[in-house]
Amino acid sequence: MKQYCLIFLFGFIVPLSLFAQSHRFDPPWNTPPNSALNFTIPGVDNVPDLYGDINNPQLVVFFAGNQYMCIDDLLAAFKTAYPQYQRIFAETLPPGILAQQIQGGSITIGNMRITLQADVYTAGKSRMMQMLPIMRDTTTYAFNKLAIMVAKGNPKHIHDLQDLGKPGIRVSMPNPAWEGIGRRIEEAYLKAGGDALKKTIMLQKVKNGSTYLTQIHHRQTPMRIMYQESDAGPVWYSEALYQQTIGHPIEMITLPAQQNIQAVYMAALLKNAPHPQAAKDFMQFLNSPSAKAIYKKYGFTTN
């Protein structure tokens, strides 16, 4: 006699196998920290962009979200190099959201309010320039470029940025209001097809619903493509590479150099850092051979 595991969700009895299938690509995609109890429930209680020890951390780092794939290896290597720091809390939300959190002093996600102050903030160069008044020191540590993420097999036969402007192609696009990559992608649209391509994707297709502006691009774009809600999304090269590396049904369309851009990743030690020595040590670590090797492993460049 077959046995079925059932869960009660929103007033309905649902077979657990069906629930798992409907959320088979949901994050977290990394390995969560060890704990006495793991109660991550895909689609219900799942906070993939908050990492580590939120209680009494010895270091707090706000990473631009597109670095999420590096965090496990990066923090493990830092703890090995600096064993005096074992309680670390990190966030990988969009850089504009992190900037608002720093300036406002808090963020609420669901029913959880976080008031921790960051010691180190990382983002692209343009965002960093806006944050200079609250920084004590900065360093450049990695670089990236753009690619297009599509479903495995490339069923819509997308080959370049100009294809994203075609009718019927559903685009997942980061909102330039708080995603630094959004404005860099707009620069690439101008290179590939001029103002007409940019307006088609960012105005006309937003208006008709075939361009979807994300709230948290590094999570939503791969999920929207894997769940067949979008056909393609311009992303950082490292994001598409990571999805392929972990075996998700994703392919990457590379872009020619003349249509691409370079992202410059910078870290800043904040003036009001609660743990200034830990912040200094982490800033130094980001330019160490071990940290550079981790970034290279995940598709970034470091020189």
Image: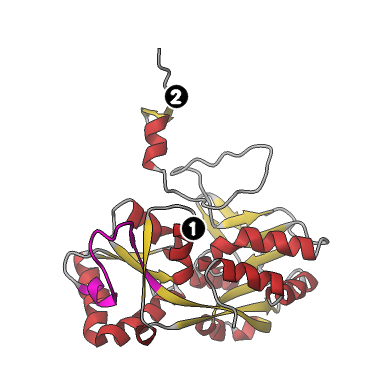
Question: Within the image, what quadrant is residue 12 found in?
Answer: top left
Q: To which residue does mark 2 refer?
A: 5
- Secondary structure beneath label 2: loop
Quarter of the N terminus within the rendering: top left
x and y percentages locating residue 174 in the rendered image: 38, 69
Q: How crowded is the residue under tag 2: few (<14 C-alpha within 10 Å), some, or many (20+)?
A: few
Q: Which amino acid does label 1 sit on?
A: Thr
Residue indicated by mark 1? 245
Q: Residue at x 66, y 68 (%)?
A: 118
- Image point 65% across, 60% down: which residue? 73
Which corner quadrant holds the C terminus? Answer: bottom right
Q: Is label 1 in a helix, a strand or a loop?
A: helix
Q: Give coordinates of residue 206: x percent, y percent.
A: 25, 69
Q: Is residue 8 magenta?
A: no
Q: Give the range drawn in magenta.
A: 147-165
Q: Residue 156 carries which label?
A: none
Residue 160 colored magenta? Answer: yes
